[in-house]
Amino acid sequence: MTQVAGLASIDIAILAGGLGTRLSSVLPNAPKVLAPIGGRPFLDFLLEALIRQGAHRVILCLGSKAQAVVDYLAGRSYSPLEIHIVTEPRPLGTAGALAFAFSSFRSDPVMVWNGDTWTDASLKKFLLSHTEAGASISLLCAHVSDPRRFGRVIINEAGRITRFEEKAAGSPEAGWVSAGVYLLERPLLASLSPAGYSSLEHDVFEALPPGSLHGYQSEASFLDIGTPDSLREAEILLAAATGRTA
């Protein structure tokens, strides 16, 4: 496994090509990544969080309503962050989008970030944990009071993921969920195919033998904006986490 010095040397692929069907009632004409949070698009909060943690290079994987994101970024600077845009020709799913963007990746591993999630977990510690674990895939996992909306992640004492529980399954007691941030080694990325629609979560992660995935457990703040309710909550949560006024 390649040893890496820090986040500055890691490509970060932001998956922002989804159709956003669950938000269509409140966000009919814009992609999720441009959802307004306190008058600013969610993308700003995400990129600023990466800058604070030392990121230098982002590959923005776009699809549906890509031109709105391209237009928003035109003329804006997020220095020292270098942003590259890759737009899929048709819906390819999360795994297919990464396969399509593979030629843009330089680092090993690559950090993958779902474009509708945010966390202030230490990415440096996540990267170190991944390196020490020796796994081809690591998931950053957050602890939430009720994991049923996300699907629970079961992690053993060795830090390996033994299974995923479906959304709405199990009891409402607190547990671990995927925070939508992953580290994938280059050989695994190279094995993905852009030929058809495929899901990173279902077609790749859940298809691997139990114990193949490393789960990094973080008590840091986590949110997603995938539903109208969670989008409304995001303004207060992001204001508290970033020190901005809601």
Image (spheres, helix red, strand yellow):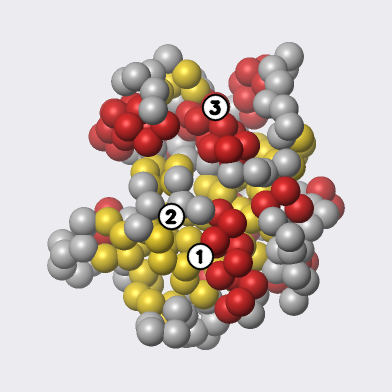
- Compare marks 2 and 3 and give the one earlier in the sequence: 3
Q: Identify the image quadrant of residue 163.
A: bottom left
Q: What residue is pinned by disc 2? A: 179
Asked if disc 1 and disc 2 are in contact, CB closer than 8 Å, the reply is yes
Q: Is residue 7 above or below residue 154?
A: above
Q: Is residue 113 above or below residue 52?
A: below
- Look at label 3 and name its amino acid: Asp
Does residue 26 appear left or right of residue 138 in this picture? left
Q: Nearer the viewer, residue 39 or 68?
A: 39
- Look at label 2 and name its amino acid: Ala
Does residue 40 appear left or right of residue 244 in this picture? right
Q: Quadrant of the C terminus?
A: top left
Asked which secondary structure carries label 1, the reply is strand
Residue 12 position in % (x across, y down): 67, 48
Q: What residue is pinned by disc 3? A: 44
Q: Is residue 56 above or below residue 184?
A: above
Q: Is residue 228 above or below residue 203?
A: above
Residue 119 position in % (x across, y down): 44, 46
Q: What residue is pinned by disc 1? A: 139
Q: Identify the image quadrant of residue 150.
A: bottom left
